[in-house]
Amino acid sequence: MSKGIYHALGLHMHQPPGNLKLLIETNDWEARQIILCYERPLRYARAFPDIARINVGFSGILLEQLQDEEIQKRYASIIDIPQMLEGYARQENIELIGMGYYHPIFPLIPEEDWEAQLRKGREKIVEVFGREPSGFWPPEMAFCMELIPALKRNGYEYVVIDGVHVRPKNILTPQEILYQPHVAEYDGHEIAIISRDRDLSNAQESGLDTGWFEREVGEKTAQCTPPSLVTTWSDGENGGWFRQTDEPSGFWGHYFAPYMERVRSGGVPITPVRISDFIQEHPPRNKVRVESGAWNIGTRGGKDFSQWSGSDSQKSALGEIGEISRYYHQMEGRLMEEKKKGRDMPGTDKILSSAYEYVLKSQTSCYLFWGDAWVSRVYEVTKKARVLLNEARQVLLR
């Protein structure tokens, strides 16, 4: 790997539980737009195998839906989903990034549930693609330092952070903070920190061209000691720019393909890269801390998680999420105590396991993000969890 400017292009892919089925039943055109967004990174990675490098994160619940045979049949006239998933598994110039299974806002959900969300998300990546992800993309880029030990226990070597939240422990220039990998440590666990450029990522999400991107990257990294790592990350299936069915007018045709052609010809002094390849060649050294926060949503900067917790209804829903989680863990603890006493508890494990799926599902960020329009879904899910937990409680208290 030569010295210079490297670009880690990242795409985040997620749909809340049941959304792919809902879309194909109620809005066929939008369903078509969205499902094609999952196929394009693979197709364009194949078109430029020599120089394209793409980093893609899938939520576990999205992959669960893509594995569903009914979904596969309903979308078969648009794309062959099993063939697409198999293609991702084999495409070496795509790096697959881990995520929380149900796409939770980790700093807002009970810490007792972090392990399950991380473990299940990682296991789904391995199940579908046969690959162990080394990198983690926090849903909504919502991160706190306390998450680091759980990430490390679950096999992650680096995490992508919105760069505005990264604070150096040494004297570093703003460019060094943003365009170099770093190390953050919490409770004796260290993880590599990859800083996302917010401004360039906003452009990636809404519209840009190769010439503008090359000039911006050149100016931003002009004072950096090479090699520089420029990381851009955005949703890969939201907004007309990515959903554009006329590909020459959207992200892949207007920007990405010309960008790759320019890189291939030597016209752009930027090298696309998979993040794991870069940090293997250039291990991070500088120590940083990361302030708790998320990425920007509209006019909200992401520092206070207000997009998901600002209203009274959102706060109430978060209270419900915490309460049902505590109820589950109390019943789980009671079951363990009964087993230690030698009591046979037939079926209780299965009941609690089913209940916990609903507990984790209730933590889906979309239920909070869409405010009053979707917040009722939290209670719909926790109601199902509560029925099962009450059933388990009756058995355990006999």
Image: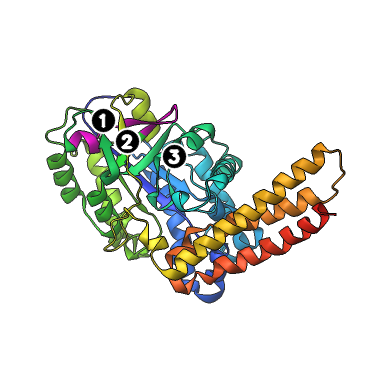
Q: Which residue is mark 1?
A: 169
Magenta span of residues: 175-192
Give neighbour class at mark 2: few <14, some 14-19, many 20+ (Cα, 10 Å): some
Question: Residue 165: image x %, image y %?
Answer: 29, 44
Left or right? Give the position of 120 relative to 179: right
Secondary structure state at the residue bearing disc 1: loop
Amino acid on which the number 2 mark rests in the picture: Arg
CB atoms at circles 3 and 1 under 8 Å apart? Answer: no
Amino acid on which the number 1 mark rests in the picture: Lys
Q: Which residue is mark 2?
A: 289
Left or right? Give the position of 238 relative to 340: left
Is residue 65 placed above or below 189 in the rendered structure?
below
Does 185 appear in magenta? yes
In this rendered view, identify the residue nearer to me: 190 or 37.
190
Give neighbour class at mark 1: few <14, some 14-19, many 20+ (Cα, 10 Å): few
Q: Earlier in the sequence, mark 3 or mark 2?
A: 3
